[in-house]
Amino acid sequence: MSKVQATRRKGPGGRPAGERALDRELARISREEASSAGEDLSDRERGAIAREILDIFFNIWIRFAVDLGRELRMTPFQWDFVMYDGGKRYRLRSGFNYARVSEMVLEEPAFPFRHMLKAELRPVGGRTYVRVGLILEEGREYERISTVVAHTNYIIYNQPAKRFSPKGLKAALSEPLRVWIRSQVRQDPPILWDFCHEKLRRG
């Protein structure tokens, strides 16, 4: 019997064996996807991750403000979740609802180019991922006549939320932040653009 004939054999229900096999495979995939969706983060886990990211982002905000005199725009607004205790000491507010935060942004709004560090807790295939990237507004001269501006997203960190590590995120941010600060100090945006083109993946 040929393979074609075998797949056309009728079972007890009168349906070809190939169709029954496909039904079983689709049922298995559906069960797995439903199971993985049910294993998503609790509010407590989501809040703990958002709190860690906001703590890291606020420390970056402080470094830009103190060391460079550049105040980044932060979302959520930094003083909604941070308290100043005096003596250059800050602490995160315990009453802030971190679990409701799914997007965190540090933006350099200065003309002519805006650069943005963005963190998201985003669902992908039934699981929540922590994704952090640099979104750059890049401009290049074209034949010395005009400037071409492009918005490009570069991925710095992308992990399932269940495997999120503050230490891992800090390590991933270390070099991009160093280059971002260098480009700010030298007032030379292409330093950051070139680094991202060469070292980071677009997303």
Image: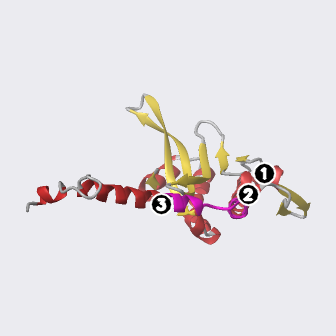
Question: How far across and how far down the image is residue 98, in percent?
Answer: 75, 56
Question: How far across and how far down the image is residue 44, in percent?
Answer: 73, 63
Left of 27 or right of it: where is 165?
right
Residue under numbered circle 1: 78
Which quadrant holds residue 157? bottom right
For the residues carrying marks 1 and 3, which lies nearer the camera in this image? 3
Q: Could you say which is closer to the camera, residue 88 or residue 58?
A: 58
- At 46% from the left edge and 50% from the top edge, which residue is drawn? 203
Residue under numbered circle 3: 31
Callout 2–callout 1 Cβ contact below 8 Å: yes
Residues at marks 2 and 1, CA–CA distance in whole angstroms: 7 Å
- How many residues crowd mark 1 within 10 Å: few (<14), some (14–19), many (20+)? some
Residue under numbered circle 2: 58
Q: Residue furthest left?
A: 1
Label 1 residue SS: helix
Q: Quadrant of the N terminus?
A: bottom left
The segment highlighted magenta reads 31-51
The prevailing secondary structure element of the residues shown in magenta is helix
Question: Amino acid under label 3?
Answer: Arg
Question: How far across and how far down the image is residue 199, in percent?
Answer: 44, 59
Left of 162 or right of it: where is 54?
right
Label 2 residue SS: helix
Q: Could you say which is closer to the camera, residue 142 or residue 80?
A: 80
- How many residues crowd mark 3 within 10 Å: few (<14), some (14–19), many (20+)? few
Residue 158 seen in render: no
